[in-house]
Image (cartoon, coloured by chain):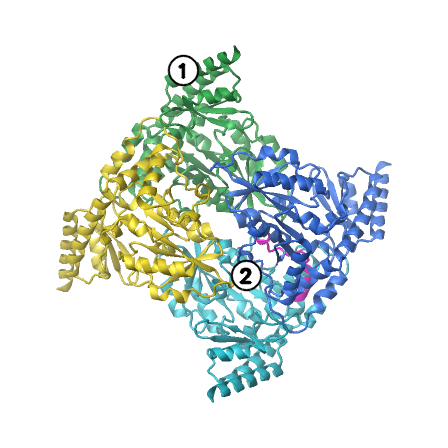
Chain colours: A green, B yellow, C cyan, D blue
Amino acid sequence: MPKQNLISFGSDNHSGVHPQILDAMFSANNKYAASYETDEDSTKLKKWIQQNWGATDSHLVFNGTAANVLAISTALRSHQAVLCSDISHLNVDECGAPEKLLGCKLIPIPHRDGKIPLSEISQFLIRRGDQHASQIKMISITQPTELGTVYTLEELQQLRELCDREKLFLHIDGARLANACVHLQCDFKDILKFADVASVGGTKNGLLFGELVVIMTASLNQDFKFIRKQAMQLPSKTQFMARAFLAYLQTQLWRDIAIHQSLLTKDMAQKIKELVPVNYPVESNAVFCCLPKDIVKALREEFFFYVWNEHTFECRLMTSFCTTQEEIDLFVTKLKTLLSRGKI
Amino acid sequence: MPKQNLISFGSDNHSGVHPQILDAMFSANNKYAASYETDEDSTKLKKWIQQNWGATDSHLVFNGTAANVLAISTALRSHQAVLCSDISHLNVDECGAPEKLLGCKLIPIPHRDGKIPLSEISQFLIRRGDQHASQIKMISITQPTELGTVYTLEELQQLRELCDREKLFLHIDGARLANACVHLQCDFKDILKFADVASVGGTKNGLLFGELVVIMTASLNQDFKFIRKQAMQLPSKTQFMARAFLAYLQTQLWRDIAIHQSLLTKDMAQKIKELVPVNYPVESNAVFCCLPKDIVKALREEFFFYVWNEHTFECRLMTSFCTTQEEIDLFVTKLKTLLSRGKI
Amino acid sequence: MPKQNLISFGSDNHSGVHPQILDAMFSANNKYAASYETDEDSTKLKKWIQQNWGATDSHLVFNGTAANVLAISTALRSHQAVLCSDISHLNVDECGAPEKLLGCKLIPIPHRDGKIPLSEISQFLIRRGDQHASQIKMISITQPTELGTVYTLEELQQLRELCDREKLFLHIDGARLANACVHLQCDFKDILKFADVASVGGTKNGLLFGELVVIMTASLNQDFKFIRKQAMQLPSKTQFMARAFLAYLQTQLWRDIAIHQSLLTKDMAQKIKELVPVNYPVESNAVFCCLPKDIVKALREEFFFYVWNEHTFECRLMTSFCTTQEEIDLFVTKLKTLLSRGKI
Amino acid sequence: MPKQNLISFGSDNHSGVHPQILDAMFSANNKYAASYETDEDSTKLKKWIQQNWGATDSHLVFNGTAANVLAISTALRSHQAVLCSDISHLNVDECGAPEKLLGCKLIPIPHRDGKIPLSEISQFLIRRGDQHASQIKMISITQPTELGTVYTLEELQQLRELCDREKLFLHIDGARLANACVHLQCDFKDILKFADVASVGGTKNGLLFGELVVIMTASLNQDFKFIRKQAMQLPSKTQFMARAFLAYLQTQLWRDIAIHQSLLTKDMAQKIKELVPVNYPVESNAVFCCLPKDIVKALREEFFFYVWNEHTFECRLMTSFCTTQEEIDLFVTKLKTLLSRGKI
């Protein structure tokens, strides 16, 4: 875990709350509001999403794990399975929450640069109707992926067609969806239209907390409020969460933040590439590269970041709304120094 | 649901965030902090609670449902049961979260003024060792109860002795524990010492969100971090939650708020009693009374509050940190007017 | 637990397998059969039930707990609740299986002679649409009840009408349904027609093992084979189970057994009434009466039976397909002797 | 699914009940016995297993899915994970029962001839202590494997040592454990001693139904009876199951059956090898080979067997206690004819 006040490239949730969002949240802190998503701001948010994204409905939950699990719960029964990439957050970073809450099986498919290889999906669609086998009923993708790559709109179109053909639901884990939008030069709605249900993140994008379960296919919007409550995910003072999302979405702050990240991340990747190989296409706000163990150790005296792979010492460097050019230059300079020292 | 900006006696979570807590939360919004309860503030909070309450450990979660369910999960396996009052929040207001998450049975015992009648517990402790029956292994009480009454320290002592004798765990749902402390003129630790595990609330006491699972019995403090994560209750930017709790607990703000509520609630009860009967001893921040249906309707044009019983039109009136004397007087005056009109 | 070979009035599952059923089961033990309910006998059984009971479908499972839980699973999601009598097998004798497997809440309603009092149901149908409360969506009754009483066809009709009016499903736990049929002088179908889904028992009626989930409402017959498999209830060599049920149902052996039980149970009740009060109307194969503790102890030297209530020493005496008149007379004589001795 | 009375090489559960087991089961069908594993025969079975296998305890359940899931439940909490082969029955043939019942994640490791490659296990033991990741706490192997291969005693020893070193539990799925014993020329106890908990099969070895959860590590033997009941796996008339197992185990009938299978399977494999390649070492009672699609179709007019792989048309041929030399010769002759026809 990072020392306090180290410069952190650890995760975009190591930054606090974006000032504009903070202001918006607490502009409403005057006396009484209805709770549990029945307040005026929550209603306003729901309507905005319906109108701007073509969604059937949207629902606030506390965190990304919950958004993913509850999004899946709208479509699947426990004997059904989700096909997802072997390194998806859903599969490896939820401590088994989908299995626990849904009773569903996750079927991992080996990724290629973080993405599910479309041409390999069909070989997983076996034993359909066989009562001994969990029945794949959903594909879940992360956009951008855990490795910072982004499915193109064409790939999304092909996935949608495959889902339609095979009668599968498509879930998009969009914890950092804004970053994908900026890469694809499109709006949330241009990606969401391919999904049946999606998780759209706030926490990793400058909010204090809160994620959205966005329902695109009307038949999936049943009894969500009960499911959420029973899953312990009904927030109380929702006016604050709703105001935060409205500030983030309505003013296009989301785009400003994601562009800021994109520029800095590409710059960082460019500079690192001159020193060590960068492992995947840099399409959102993360750079992956393998570094020598002792250099990792030395770097972590001044900067925090995660070692992504215990075996290869692949590291992840991630930017947030508050990362600065200066911080990146400091990091690259330090890395350069350490590497050159190592060579002598 | 309340109209916006109506004066609300609906619940203490209809108020926003206490200004002192708000200031404390965002005093830390400067650059990077570790996430997931590994930040300095969370560590500080844990230590404070260990030192001041004699707790083994404490853990942040998002809301009260989660605090209750995860507190129970530290002690029970799914074939075991919780004995709780028939009107406990756990039993009737969690939409079945304990059953879903824990697979446990809740065994309701008819309440007396909101409390579990101690003398009747033993008759529920039957079929022990019988493989066909869920085995009662925990008693869960709410302090103060859902009807605003408070278990005395003597009653807590007797409950503890019964639990020891019968090898049961004791859980205290303390969503509004501060109010009980003020009534009993004691500290949190004086109540918590009777429990094996407790839920201590923030959301209903002026925080934005966040509750504590406080573990008093060391053997129950196993693998909590995994259980919490799998239950989708691991918050991300915990420094904000931790600072809020520190501000609430360390400065005795909790006591100031609860005293404020106590004084206003007693005043309100006193004035209502002159008009209609008040149903239970007023020992925390709620007043219950039955009102004629048309008067309820008229009152709710100006004030929000809940009809607690669909059949008897028993209403609950609850004060919060931001309730004012003026608001209470407005309510009582209106009620008086409506009742006198009704009589003519 | 009973000593071996004591005469047992403990339960109808203390008897072995009825000879006619045994013969039928193993008439098929010659070489190969498809497994997992895809064999010819299982298909024959399904068809017979569809044709004779007007059922949509029926499914074999191992035991009564599973029949009840899986029957409920066809209709309910985890945030919904089942209204059942407080002493129903479902509520007190499944060790929390419904909570564990379904995540649903059971809401107990105080029984009257074992039955749910129809006039009191409506007061439990509260908070509909309130996201904080488990939503009652099913009524489950036991026919005959755990106390040996039987709902009349009129009562069933009224229950059905209430369910239709309130949009609830009706489940019948028919672990001993044959006994109810004989009491009501009707066929299985005359009772099942009121249900949406039912459990029909084999184990307690002379079979080795096996129960049926009978689906009366077509919309509930979805994906059952997967649900059953995932619930670990898919039997392998189903031809034996199917032949047993065919022998039991097709030849009206069920009626012969239930008539045998009815005659003996009424005789037993009559004779016991001359000695001690019998507690409930005797309408199936059980007699309940309170006996002095020391007499219970002495009786259990020669006969096995259960003490139903640890506090009142209410005992349950149950007959099975192999109970004889001689065994009953031995019991009554012994009881008479012990009671008269006690008086001196 | 097979046509009735086709010769079946489909599975060893396509055969009925071994005559000696049948006789033993129903030798006890005279009057009363205690139910729910409290009868004399069940006690006798438990004792025999404790004495002969060095087990702490053993418990009867209905089927193999339940034996596996409940065996695991003795050791794991829901945030922990099981490492198993990607083609293990546990992973692909239980329709997600482990996920549903336990809430655990299964982590699949690519098999080599059906076995978990020991040298590759350590690379899966990552992220230990990381709250975001399911924590591997158990390795589950199938013995013999789903491909008919058998772990040697040396391999088992190495696995045990690895488990001890890494503080993992070892589960053995022994649905056909007798076949492994005969291959290794050893007794059940010589394999079971390496396990913490095991599933030992009856259904696939000539019993009507029933499997054993055998607990080798004493600390895992807690509250099993409640867990089993809540999991809907408590059988009623256990004297029949217990007698079947006693007949199977005590008289060494298990060895006779497994030797019979071994001889026939090796003969079959030898004869098939002359026609088409056999895919894996033949070490128990299954032969795998790829056959042309149209030959599969023609063969299945007279014999039933499963196509194991929809893509490659790999077929599984399995012998049971009642397979005869004649049946094998008929099959091989037919295959030979079809293949030679194809060549012309």
Say if D115 sits above or below B142 in the image: above
The chief SS type of the magenta part is helix
Identified at 53% across, 32% down, the residue is A87
Crowdedness near tag 1: few (<14), some (14–19) or many (≥20) residues, C-alpha within 10 Å: some
- The quadrant where residue C133 appears: bottom left
- The image shows residue B96 at horizontal and vertical percentages of 42, 53
Q: Does dot 2 land on a helix, a strand or a loop?
A: helix
Q: Amino acid at mark 2?
A: Thr
Residue A271 placed where, x, y %?
Answer: 46, 14
| Residue D74 within the segment the image draws in magenta | no
For the residue marked with disc 1, what is the amino acid? Asp
The quarter in which the C terminus of chain B is drawn is bottom left
Name which quarter of the figure residue C247 lies in.
bottom right
Query: Which numbered disc, 2 or 1, marks the residue closer to the eye?
Result: 1
Nearer the observer, C178 or D270: D270
- The chain letter under disc 2 is C
Chain of the residue under the numbered disc 1 shown in the image: A
Q: Is residue C261 above or below residue B116?
A: below
Foreground: D172 or C149? D172
Task: Report the front residue among D197 and C253.
Answer: D197
Q: Give the labeled residue for mark 2.
A: C65
In the drawing, does residue C308 fall left or right of residue D152? left
Point out the residue furthest to the top here: A344
Front-lying residue, C38 or D49 = D49
SS under mark 1: helix
Q: What percent of the width, then of the height, locates residue A123?
A: 63, 36
Q: Position of residue D261 (x, y in %)?
A: 78, 51
Magenta segment boundaries in residue numbering: C224-244
> For the residues marked 2 and 1, what is the alpha-carbon distance in whole angstroms?
66 Å
Residue A329: which disc? 1
